[in-house]
Image (cartoon, rainbow, N blue to C red):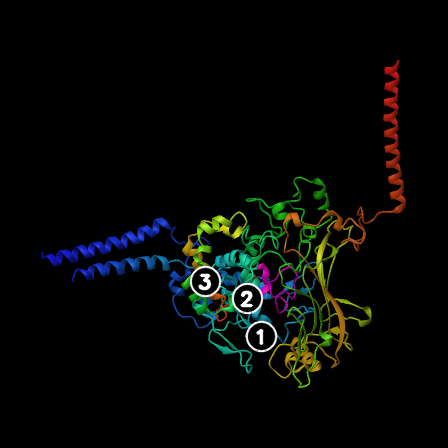
Amino acid sequence: MGLNSLRQSAGCVLAVLLYLFSVSALAVDEPKPLKLTTTADHSKFKELQREFQSGPEVTKACLTCHTEAAGQIHRTKHWKWEHLNPDSGQTLGKKHILNNFCISIASNYSACTSCHIGYGWKDANFDFSVKENVDCLVCHDTTGIYKKPPGLAGNPVIKDMELPPGSGKIVKGIDITKVAQKVGKSSRDTCGACHFFGGGGDAVKHGDLDSSMAAPDRELDVHMDATGLDFTCATCHKTSSHDVAGSRYTPTAMDKGGAHIRGKEDNSNPATCVSCHGNGPHKKEERLNQHATKVACQTCHIPAFARGGVATKMNWDWSTAGERDAEGKQVVRKDDKGRVIYESRKGTFTLGENVKPEYFWFNGDVNYTLVTDKIEKSEGVIRINWLGGSPTDGKSLIWPVKVFRGSQPFDPINKTLVKPHTAGNDDTGYWKNLVWDKAVEAGMKDAGLPFSGQVDFVKTEMFWPITHMVAPKENALACVECHSKNGRLTGIQGVYIPGRDANKLIDTIGWGIALLALLGSLGHGLMLIAARRKHQGE
Amino acid sequence: MKSVKPIAAAVLLTLLGASFSASAYDADWKRGRIYYRSVCTSCHVAMPVGSINPSTKTMAEWSSYIQADKHAKGKDTVKQYVSKSYRASIKSANKAAEKFAEVPDQELLDDIKAFLIKGAKDGEAPASCS
C-alpha cells in the first residue's frame, strides 16, 4: 500500500468519523424532531405518494385505509345539513331553514357549500350517497393552506384560476398533495375555517366565534388559551364516529348529570360546562353553586362577546340594499375603523365589539319560523328562531344570548319569508343585478315554493346562545352587575334578585328591625356595664 | 494534493449530515404563530415600531430577514429573541416563552419562519398579528 493510498484511506475514515460525530452531536444537543400529535406520518403512505388533481381523488385514497369513515360522515348533520327536531317535529338544518343574515342556501349552493364537508354540492340534486364526495381535508388539514372559496361548490382551487369568472382576480391553486400528506387531527383552525366565518364572513353570525379564536390568549378564552390549556374545539365537542357532539338546534340548556367519568357510560352532551366541572364547581363559595341552579355558567363567565378585536354583526338591514353611485356602480361604505357598514348588494350593517349579551330563560328548546309558515308584518318583529324557557318549568336557566336583528325580504301577498337568489354571476343573482323580484323569483323557484312577484321587508330577530369566549374567573361578572337596579338581568322575570327587586316598604321594615336590634343590643350592653359598675361600687 | 480530496469530502459529508438532520424537522407553523404573536408582537406593540403583520412582507423578504439575522436594523440578532436564554429571561411574564422554554432554538426559529412564509403577502395564507 502506497503513501497516497494510506492518506486516502485515512481521509475516508476521517470523513466517516466526522459525519458520525456531526449526527451524534446533534442528536445529543437537540432532541430528535418527532411528531407528538399523531402516530402516523401520512407522507409515508404509498396511497398518498402521488400527485392529486382533485379532492375526491384524495378521499378515495383516504378510504383505502379508513374504510368506514365516509359512511360515518354520511350519517352526520355536518354532511346532511339537515336535522329533524324530535320535540317540535320541525325539519331544520341549513338545507331547510332560513336566517336573517345570508338568508338561505337554496339557489346559492355553490357559494354556501364552500363550508360543506363535501365536494360538488352545486344544486338541489347533489348525491349525498357518494363516498368520494366527502371532504376529509377540510377537517384534517394541518397546513393551514386548504381553502374552499365560495362559488366552487365546496371544491378547492387546485390550479390558478380567475374567481369570480370575469373579475380579473386570480386565486392561486393549493398543493392538495401536500395537504393530503400532512393530515392530522382537527383543530381550532379547521373547525374555525367555517364556524368562525358563519354567515359569510368573520364574526358575522356568532358573537363568540371568530378568527381571534384561532390562537386566543387567556383573557379571550381560558380554555382555548394557546399558551395555556390550548383546548381544540374537539376537546369539548367530543366526537364519536365522526359525529361531533353539540347542536345549535337541540342544545343542552341545563345539565343535571354532573361531570363525566371514565368508564361510566354517559350519553349526555359532553360539550356542556357541567360535563367537566360538575354541578358544584365553586369550591370556596357555596352561594355561587346555588346560583348555578338558576343561572347558566356562561352568564357570569362570559361577560361580553366579540372580545377578540373582531366586530360581530348585530344588525343586518337588507331593505337599504341596492344603492348605486352616479356611474351606476355598486357602493361600499366603511366606518372610521375601516369596517364595512354598507354594501349595495347586502344593505346596512351595525357592528359590535365587547358586546354585553341579552339574557333569557332558556330550556334548550329552539323553534323556527320556516319559509312555509305564514307571517304578518303587522305583528312587528318576526322571530326567525326563538328560545323556549320559563322560570317555572324546572328545565330553564338564565342564558346570555346574542340577538341578531335585521330586516329582510318577504312576500306580502303569500305572507311568507322568502329565499332570494343572492350569490351567483347570473342575471338573477341579487349581488350582481340588485333586482329583488328577479332574485326572489329565482330563489323560490329553486326551493319549489310559491312567489307572488311582490317583495316587501319585515323586521326579524334570531337568538344565538353564547357559550364560547369564556373569561378567566377573575374576570367573571361581579355581583353588582346583576344585583342592582338596571343591572344585566333587568328583563328577567319570575325570580327574586336581591338588589334589583328591592321594595321600599320591605326595605324600610327590614332596616327598621335591624336598627331596633342594634339599639337593643347596645342598650343591653350599656345596662350590663352599668350593673357591673354598680356591683363593683357596692 | 491528492489527500485534500478526502478531507474535502469529509467536510462536505459533515455538512450534509448536519443539514440532513436539520432539514428533518417539519416546522410547526402554529407554534410559530403563537410565539410570533405572543412574544414578537406583544413587545413590538409596546415599542414605537408597532406590530408587524406577516402579510406586510413577501416570502422572499421574510426569508432574507431570517437569513440575515439582523434585528432592529442590525443592532442585535433575530436569533437572540428566539433563544432559550431569552425565553428564560422573560418566561415569568410571558406565557409563550414559558410554554416553549425547552424547544430547541433552531426548531422554534423554523416554526416562526414557517408561519411568516405562510402568512406573507404572497404566501399561502396571508396573516395578521392578531
On screen, A349 above or below A34?
below
Q: Is residue A178 magenta?
A: no
- Spatial CA distance of label 2 from label 3 is 27 Å
- Which residue corresponds to the image point at 39% horizontal and 54% vertical from the top-left? A33
Q: Which region is colored magenta?
A: A193-213
On screen, B125 above or below A470?
below
Front residue of this view, candidates A33 and B13:
B13
Q: What label does residue A110 carry, if any?
A: 1
- Residue A413 percent location from the top left of the image: 78, 78
Question: Mark 1 and mark 3 in contact (Cβ < 8 Å)?
Answer: no
Which residue, given by chain and number where applicable, does mark 2 sit on?
A117
Under mark 3, the amino acid is Ala
Q: Secondary structure at mark 2?
A: loop
Which residue, given by chain and number where applicable, does mark 3 sit on?
B114
Q: Is residue A482 visible?
A: yes
Q: Horizontally, is B99 left or right of A40 in the view? A: right
Q: Secondary structure at mark 3?
A: helix
Q: Chain of mark 2?
A: A
Which SS does the magenta portion mostly show? loop
Q: Chain of mark 1?
A: A
- Residue A361 percent location from the top left of the image: 75, 54
Q: Is residue B98 visible?
A: no
Q: Secondary structure at mark 1?
A: helix
Density class for disc 3 (Cα within 10 Å; few <14, some 14-19, many ≥20) is: many
- Residue A532 percent location from the top left of the image: 86, 19
- Which residue corresponds to the image point at 53% horizontal and 64% vertical from the top-left? B52
